[in-house]
Structures are given as structure tokens and as C-alpha cells.
Image (cartoon, helix red, strand yellow):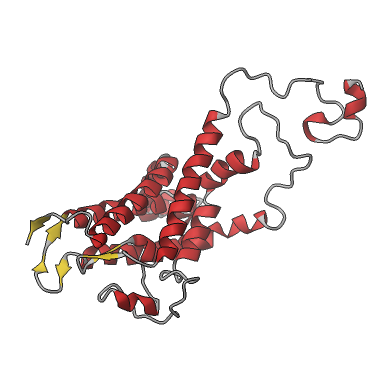
Amino acid sequence: MTATARRVGARGVDAPGRAAVGARTLRTDRWWLAPAATAAGLLVFVVYATARAFEQAYFFADERYLTPFYSPCVSLGCASAPGSSHFGMFLPDNPLIPYAALSLPFLLGFRLTCYYYRKAYYRSFWLAPAACAVPEPHARQTGETRFPLILQNAHRYFFYFAVLVSLVNTYDALVAFRHPDDGFVVGVGNLVLLANVALLWCYTASCHSCRHVMGGRLTHFSKHPVRYWFWTRISALNTRHMFFAWITLASLILTDLYVTLVARGTIVDLRLIG
């Protein structure tokens, strides 16, 4: 069968009028390394986070450290770790319901609809496209105009929930400086929680939606000097949005791992003050 015959009625790169190239791609470099590494990194985080969210144990250490995967801890099961629930316990204790079920869906929605993560998993999992000059395997591309990808447009709303969750994580990090028996103390765990919160704020603030909130729809920056000041700072952060997207995945795992190891008694939290 000739190339012309194969292309009759075809779509995409094989549509009539497109150059007939028999090879899958003319690239000779290892173009698949980037999407493969991205897929591996995202899968590691998803598997770890899912396992920890449903383990429902070792989430509160030294009577003050709460892992971000369980914040806010609002399940009745949080009673197993006194002091871990800062906002009350009202969700049923069920192995199929994470203790932080109130926040996890919104955080998942914020990450899934994030502009950078869209590019990451579109290329790595959906192969749309996997890399430059590598054709897509899809005969038809509708973009984000149909279900379920049209839900990506809800990113700006998930952003507001992400801000609320970041505030809750900040509160968790601040109250962790007070031990119920020893009063004000500073341990390595406090530094770990603070570093994680700072990185989460950088990721949230560098979001494209945050940049739009600060300076979107303005036609005269000179008339809005305060918003313009914030917009310039957010724009500078926005250039590193990909970096913060990845580093926060690592910081979340490391923070949770530290709290887990302390809760298990595997390591002892080093007290710096108190």
C-alpha cells in the first residue's frame, strides 16, 4: 500500500496534504527520557501520597507535628492522636475515607488543573504530544473543549481553596512550636514544617491564576500601584512555577516521612530550644 493510499481519509499527521514521512519520527536523540522521567516522578508521588493518606496511622508526632497529608485532621479517627485535630472532628472514621478528606479533593483538583502539571501529564501520559517533532498517536484532538478536560477551566476556583489549605498548613506549622507539656520549643521538625509551608506558598503564589488575580483585567497599571507591585512580584515567581511544582512534591514527601519516622519512634526529633 502506497503512502498516498494510506493517507486517504486519515487525520492528524497522516491527513491528506501533509508530507509523507514513513518514519515514526526523524529525531535521533533520546526524546523519550523527559516524558518518561516526568511520568515516573508523578507516579512515585501519587503512589506514596495515596498509601499514606489511607494508612491512617503515624501522622502526628511529639504531640505537635501534623503531617500535611492529614491536615486538617477532621475525622473521628483523629482521636487516636490527641491534639492532632485543630478544627474539630466531624467526618466518620472509615478506612475508605482519608482523615483529611475535607482538603485532599481540592488539593488534588488544584494540582491536576495546574497549567504546568497539565503540560507534564499531557506529554507523559496522554502523549499530546510526547515531545517536539514527535507526532501524537491520536487521530483527533479536541483540546479542553469537551468532558472531562473541560473541567481544567476550573483551575482558578481550585486556586482559592488551595490558598485556604495553605493557611491551614501555616497554622499547623505555627502551633507546632508549642508542646502541651514543655511550652514553647523548637525542634528539627519545626524547621521541616516551616520549610515545607514556605515552598507551598511559593508554588501557590507563582500560580498563573494568582498572577491574574493580582494584575488581570487592568488596563492602566499606573492607576493601581499596589496591584502592580504585587503583579510584578508574582510574575517573577511565575517564571519558576515548574521548579516549585516539583520541589513541593519532594518537600511534601520528606515532611510526611519525617513526621512518620518520629511517630514510629524510628528517629528522635532533635530539640534546638526547649
Q: Position of residue 147 (x, y in %)?
A: 70, 58
Q: Residue at x 31, y 64 (%)?
A: 58
The answer to whether 33 appears left or right of 78 in the picture is right
The answer to whether 206 appears left or right of 259 in the picture is right
The answer to whether 152 appears left or right of 15 in the picture is left
Q: Nearer the viewer, residue 94 or 125?
A: 94
Instruction: From this view, report whether residue 119 is shown above or below residue 104.
Output: above
Q: Quadrant of residue 80?
A: bottom left
Q: Nearer the viewer, residue 12 or 101?
A: 101
Q: Quadrant of residue 132?
A: top right
Q: Residue at x 64, y 43 (%)?
A: 126
Q: Residue at x 38, y 61 (%)?
A: 69
Instruction: From this view, report whether residue 71 is shown above or below residue 146.
Output: below
Q: Quadrant of residue 152?
A: bottom right
Instruction: From this view, report whether residue 104 is shown above or below residue 146.
Output: below
Q: Position of residue 186 (x, y in %)?
A: 13, 59
Q: Position of residue 76 (x, y in %)?
A: 38, 80
The answer to whether 270 appears left or right of 125 in the picture is left
Numbered circles on residues, count: 0
Q: Position of residue 19 (x, y in %)?
A: 80, 21
Residue 138 visible? The answer is yes
Quarter of the image containing the N terminus?
top right
Quarter of the image containing the C terminus?
bottom left
Residue 86 visible? The answer is no
